[in-house]
Amino acid sequence: MKVVLKTDVKGTGKKDELVEVSDGYARNFLFPRKLAVAADAAAVNDVRNKEAARQHHKEEEEAAARALAAKIDGGRLTVHAKAGSGGRLFGAVTAKDIAAAAASAYGVEVDKRKIVLTADIKSYGSYPVEFKVYPGVSATVTVSVEE
């Protein structure tokens, strides 16, 4: 029997999935607990519409991420930090500092967890930094650390 799951059911499937289960399992377990509904034409159409809407939102998010990556890719950020003798910084430049610099320079909010530092930034100079904007979409920015 084909059913549409209303919630995640361990071992059977995820919410809004169309799955094939035995008749007894559907009648005795899924239907009484309101975990699923029979897969009639209306329920199947509802599942297809929800999947199409989910796909559309995903495509919009990816397009926005690509636009953001194009805006900041190849850009240059400047971070000001204090240093002691020899140009060695007091502490290090963190992803939080770079996110704040990106917000002020480009006017976009970038989560600090999406910034990939290949090495610790502990002295003055220029460093390449990768921004992972969306899965499969990234941008590289040069961060310049100055006094």
Image: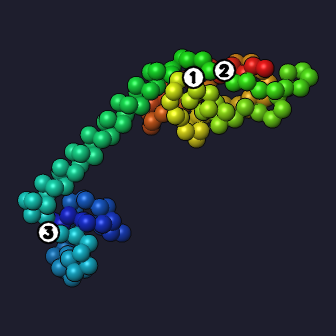
Q: In the visual, does 110 lie left or right of 128?
A: left
* Label ID, residue 105: 1
Task: Provide residue 83's location: percent of width, then percent of height.
Answer: 84, 26
* Label ID, residue 38: 3
**Residue 127 visible:** no
Task: Tell me the element at label 1.
Answer: helix
Task: Provide residue 91's location: percent of width, then percent of height.
Answer: 81, 35
Residue positioned 67% across, 33% down in the render: 97
Instruction: Look at label 2 and name its amino acid.
Output: Thr
Instruction: Look at label 3 and name its amino acid.
Output: Ala
Q: Quadrant of the C terminus?
A: top right
Mark 2 / mark 3, whichever is N-terminal = 3
Choose top left, top right, bottom left or bottom right for residue 18: bottom left
Q: Nearer the viewer, residue 128 or 27?
A: 128
Residue positioned 22% across, 51% down in the render: 50
**Residue 135 visible:** yes
Spatial distance from mark 1 to mark 3, Cα to Cα?
54 Å
